[in-house]
Amino acid sequence: MKKLLALTLGTAFTATVATPVLAENFLDYTGVYAAATYTTPSNNGLSMGDMITQVPAAGAIDTFNRALFVQPGFSWDYNVGINYHFPHTHTRAFLDYDNFQDNKERQANGVRDLGAFPAAAGPTTNASARVEQHMDEWRLGLTHYLHFGSRFFVDFSAYVEYDRVLQAFYEHNTGGAPIGGVTTTAFRETDNSFDGWGPGVGFRITGIPYAPCPNFSLFAGAMTTLLYTKDKFHEYEYFNAELFYAYSPENSRSILGKLDIDFGIDYRNVLHMNNTKLRSGVTLGVRYMNIFNAFKNGNTYFNPFPTAAAGGFAANTGYPNDFGRVGPYLQFRIGGMHA
């Protein structure tokens, strides 16, 4: 009994002493970071109709017209993450999250869209369109560093990624040539979205260009991911307050390629706080990201009505569009001395 009691007390004492040591070692090898991002979507395909610049010639269906687009703008968003350096190795584990939200609106007069068009010698149309975009990006993986001397470094990464991207496009057009004495009013909403998982690999090259200033370095890197996604689409239009059509194809599956490129300048330093050393850093960089054929627009093409009386109308919900972002970011890091 005495031996059992002594063993129990000894184990409890060892755990009590070891727990702060383990916690201290864990924090010493752990780092966190946060970044303010200022990016804009690089995709297009956001047409809100067109304007006639010259009356069509006799016998011609159409001649001079100019398509109008809603151009997405820059938006402030954020990126956060945590990394852990495995002791006595050049390998780190990381978990990264990036958030993006943006909306942009445009108005114009004299636009042909959704069956509403300006009269030749009468009232014009008043059109508006708005795009809303949202993206969530998660990455969990490992990074391994290779050192070539004291001024040149290369790191390789492998990870699993989850992406969720949504885009909603709203169009409204009213006025113009009356139909049956009623002013034309039309509204359309088009929703594209996808979410999926996939593996990825990447690399980053870092160099210290000026030896007397080892705290400053330049970097450039790229990451590529294959995403297995579920694609969703829905579109409907109201014409003069009545439902004109609604498309809701079943969800489709696809494999998307994603490319990430970033480059910039980095500053790192050691902070001394109450006899504790912490590593800190600031990064100013530029990121370019693109997901190829991201929005499938329903994956439907030419589905005519079965009767000739319908005029052979064929519904084409659109062609695939890329989705991407580009812009600068400012990142702050802090962690243990070995993080």
Image (cartoon, rainbow, N blue to C red):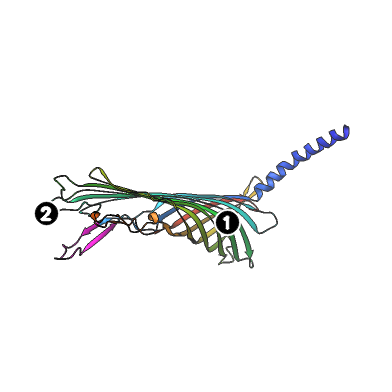
Residue furthest right in the image: 2
In percent of width and height, residue 338 lies at 65, 53
Q: Residue at x 48, y 54 (%)?
A: 229
Instruction: Please state which amino acid type lies under the numbered disc 1.
Output: Tyr
In percent of width and height, residue 223 lies at 52, 61
Q: From the image, which quarter does the N terminus lie in?
A: top right
Q: Quadrant of residue 142?
A: bottom right
In percent of width and height, residue 120 lies at 13, 55
Q: Secondary structure at mark 2?
A: loop
Q: Quadrant of residue 5?
A: top right
Residue 306 horizontal side relative to residue 16, left or right: left
Query: Which residues are the magenta region?
Result: 50-68
Decide: is 146 above or below 253. below
Q: Residue at x 84, y 37 (%)?
A: 7
Q: Are marks 2 and 1 in contact (CB under 8 Å)?
A: no
Which label number is shown at residue 193? none
- Decide which of 318, 161 is in the foreground and name it: 318
In percent of width and height, residue 95 lies at 57, 51
Decide: is 215 above or below 174. below
Decide: is 258 above or below 78. below
**Residue 66 is inside the magenta segment:** yes
**Residue 299 is inside the magenta segment:** no
Q: Earlier in the sequence, mark 2 or mark 1?
A: 2
Residue furthest top in the image: 1
Residue furthest front in the image: 307
Between the residue at mark 2 and the residue at mark 1, the CA separation in whole angstroms equals: 62 Å
Residue 236 horizontal side relative to residue 176, left or right: right
Q: Secondary structure at mark 1?
A: strand
Residue position marked by numbered label 1 in the rendering: 159
> Dot 1 surroundings within 10 Å: few (below 14), some, or many (20 or more)?
many
Q: Quadrant of residue 303?
A: bottom left
Residue position marked by numbered label 2 in the rendering: 121
